[in-house]
Image (cartoon, rainbow, N blue to C red):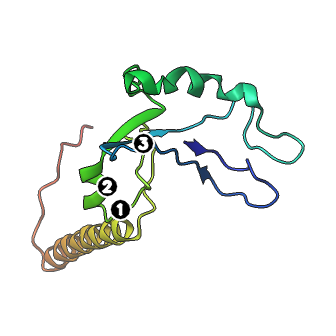
Amino acid sequence: MRLPNGVFAPYTGIKTNLLFFTKGTPTQDVWYYEHPYPAGVKNYNKTKPIRIEEFDAEKAWWGTEADGFASRVENERAWKVSIEQIKAAGYNLDQKNPHAADAVSHDPEQLLADYARLQGEAQALRDELRDILAKSLDGQSMPLSGTIKA
């Protein structure tokens, strides 16, 4: 369960993850649930702490061990990752919510790969611009993309 920023303020302002295990059974899947801020709340703090009533949605979603948590379903706040995916990620449990459109990865390897890709794209645009300018200075006309209407 991912708790939002400020739950443990003033001691830490970072998000906190709670881990729950089922004793005696090997892990097949890891379930994630992102606890949302209630309406009108932008951050928790010492004077506006998280309240136990806010966990009613998680309690309803959680299900029971007796039926193997069969009632759990993925939704915009909950998702499941297989143990094979966790192993492939080097046992990194920081798995982003696939249902969140604006989820940002803070994985250093992913950030470096994105940076390298963007640098390559920027260099390709610089090369293209240089070629266009060189041709223009040589007196060669470049076709315009579109027509000019008077």
Query: Residue at the location (17% across, 79% down)?
Result: 134
Residue ID at (48%, 23%): 63
Label at residue 75? none
Q: In which quarter of the image is the C terminus?
A: top left
Q: Could you say which disc has been placed on residue 86 in the image?
A: 2
> How far across and down, in percent of the image, does residue 80 sit?
36, 38
Q: Foreground residue, 15 or 71?
A: 71
Residue 39 visible somewhere in the drawing: no
The residue tagged 1 is: 91
Q: How many marks?
A: 3
Marks 3 and 1, the one that precedes in the sequence:
1
Q: Distance between the residues labelled 2 and 1?
A: 5 Å
Please say if the residues under marks 3 and 1 sit with CB atoms less than 8 Å apart.
no
Q: Where is residue 26 in the image (x, y as percent from the top left)?
A: 32, 47
The quarter in which the N terminus is drawn is top right
> From what the image shows, is residue 96 above or below residue 36?
below
Sequence order check, earlier mark of 2 and 1 = 2
**Residue 43: percent from left, percent from top:** 74, 43
Under mark 1, the amino acid is Tyr
For label 3, the SS is loop
SS state under label 1? loop
| Tag 2: amino acid | Ile
Foreground: disc 3 or disc 1: 1
In the rendering, at what x and y percent does residue 4 appear?
A: 64, 45
| Residue 57 position (above or below residue 9) | above
Q: Residue at x 82, y 47 (%)?
A: 45
Q: Which of marks 2 and 3 is nearer the N terminus?
A: 2
Q: Do the residues labelled 2 and 1 touch (CB within 8 Å)?
A: yes
Q: Name the residue under label 3.
A: 97
- Residue type, numbered disc 3: Asn
How far apart in space, not on screen, are marks 2 and 3 (Cα)? 14 Å
